[in-house]
Image (spheres, rainbow, N blue to C red):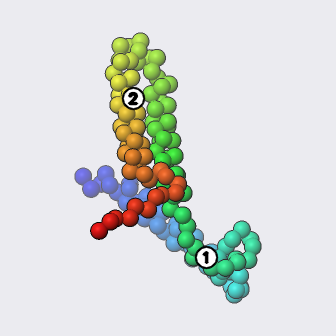
C-alpha cells in the first residue's frame, strides 16, 4: 500500500532538492554589491517620492470583487453554452437551461444584496444616530 505513495514522495524530494541546489548555486554565483538603491521600494525604476504607506481606497477592491464575480460567472457558463446544442439533442437541454438560470439567479441575488446594503456606492452617506 505504501509503495503507491513512493512515486509522489520521490517526486517531492527531487523537487525540494532541485530548489535547494538552485538556490545554493545562485547564492555562490551572484555578485555581492551593497547599494542603497537595492534596499528601497521599487517604483518602476524611479526613485520613490514620499512614504510608501498610503491610505488606499477600499472601494477599488469592492469593484474588483464584483467584476470577478461576474467574470467567473461568464467563465463557468461558457462551457455549458458550447455543448448546449448537444444536450438539447439528447433531451437534457431543459435541465441544463434550468441549472444556468439558477446559477445566474444566485449571483443576481448576491448582487442585489450588495447593492441594497450600499456597498456599491462610491461615496457612502454617513448616517448619524440620534440619541
Q: Is residue 25 above or below residue 1?
A: below
Residue 71 lies, with reference to residue 126, above or below; the image says above
Query: In this rendering, would 104 be left or right of 64?
Result: left
On the rendered image, what quadrant is the C terminus found in?
bottom left
Identify the residue at image location x=48%, y=58%: 124
Residue 7 in the image: state x and y as whole percent. 38, 54
Q: Is residue 98 visible?
A: yes
SS category of the residue bearing label 2? helix
Relative to the observer, which residue lies in front, 36 or 129? 129
Which residue is at 50% across, 25% downward?
82
Cα gap from disc 2 to disc 1, whole angstroms: 45 Å
Q: Residue at x 75, y 73 (%)?
A: 46
- Which residue is depicted at the point 46% across and 67% down? 16
Number of marks in the rendered image: 2
How busy is the neighbourhood of tag 1: few (under 14 within 10 Å), some, or many (20 plus)?
few
- Residue 52 numbered tag: 1
Tag of residue 100: 2
Amino acid at each position: 500500500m505504501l509503495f503507491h505513495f513512493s512515486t509522489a514522495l520521490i517526486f517531492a524530494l527531487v523537487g525540494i532538492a532541485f530548489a535547494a541546489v538552485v538556490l545554493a548555486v545562485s547564492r555562490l554565483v551572484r555578485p555581492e554589491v551593497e547599494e542603497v538603491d537595492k534596499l528601497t521600494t521599487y517604483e518602476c525604476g524611479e526613485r520613490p517620492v514620499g512614504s510608501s504607506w498610503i491610505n488606499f481606497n477600499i472601494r477599488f477592491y469592492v469593484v474588483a470583487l464584483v467584476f470577478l464575480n461576474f467574470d467567473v460567472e461568464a467563465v463557468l457558463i461558457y462551457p455549458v453554452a458550447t455543448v448546449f446544442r448537444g444536450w438539447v439533442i439528447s433531451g437534457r437541454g431543459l435541465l441544463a437551461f434550468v441549472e444556468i438560470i439558477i446559477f445566474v439567479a444566485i449571483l443576481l441575488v448576491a448582487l442585489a444584496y450588495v447593492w441594497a446594503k450600499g456597498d456599491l456606492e462610491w461615496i457612502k452617506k454617513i448616517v448619524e444616530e440620534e440619541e
